[in-house]
């Protein structure tokens, strides 16, 4: 391992979709964390793909690696009022 600075690109896709959608924005991330507000994402199963690269430290000769998550569920449906009971 070397101490090269890494940048990251994060993509996601829904179950049944063939293409990945960019989540991290047009510029690569330098932070190793990303907050994702899923309010606008339809409920369902999703996967995340992260690509890490040391291209900034090695222009033209950078290396990259990609890893994907397991499927996980996004459920943004608020709980219904019927679930709460009054005493």
Image (cartoon, rainbow, N blue to C red):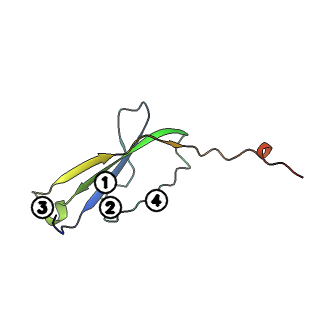
Q: CA distance from mark 4 to mark 2?
A: 12 Å
- Dot label at residue 9: 1
Q: CA distance from mark 1 to mark 2?
A: 6 Å
Closer mark to the observer between disc 4 and disc 3? 4
Disc 2, SS: loop
**Image position of 13 (left or right of 38):** left
Residue drawn at (33%, 55%), measured in percent from left and top? 26
Q: Earlier in the sequence, mark 1 or mark 2?
A: 1
| Tally of marks | 4
Disc 1, SS: strand
Pointers 4 and 2 in contact (CB under 8 A)? Answer: no
Q: Earlier in the sequence, mark 4 or mark 3?
A: 4
Pointers 4 and 1 in contact (CB under 8 A)? Answer: no
Q: Of residues 69 and 52, which is closer to you in this image? A: 69
- Dot label at residue 59: 3
Point out the image quarter for the N terminus: bottom left
Point out the residue furthest to the bottom here. 3
Residue drawn at (54%, 47%), measured in percent from left and top? 40
Q: CA distance from mark 3 to mark 2?
A: 17 Å
Q: Earlier in the sequence, mark 4 or mark 1?
A: 1
- Dot label at residue 35: 4
Disc 3, SS: loop
């Amino acid at each position: 391992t070397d101490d090269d600075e890494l940048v990251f690109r994060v993509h996601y896709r829904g179950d049944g979709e063939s293409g990945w959608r960019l989540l991290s924005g047009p510029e690569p991330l330098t932070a190793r964390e990303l907050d994702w507000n899923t309010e606008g994402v339809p409920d369902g199963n999703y996967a995340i793909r992260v690509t890490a690269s040391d291209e900034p430290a090695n222009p033209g000769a950078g290396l990259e690696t990609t890893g994907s998550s397991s499927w996980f569920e996004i459920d943004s449906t608020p709980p219904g009022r019927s679930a709460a009971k009054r005493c």
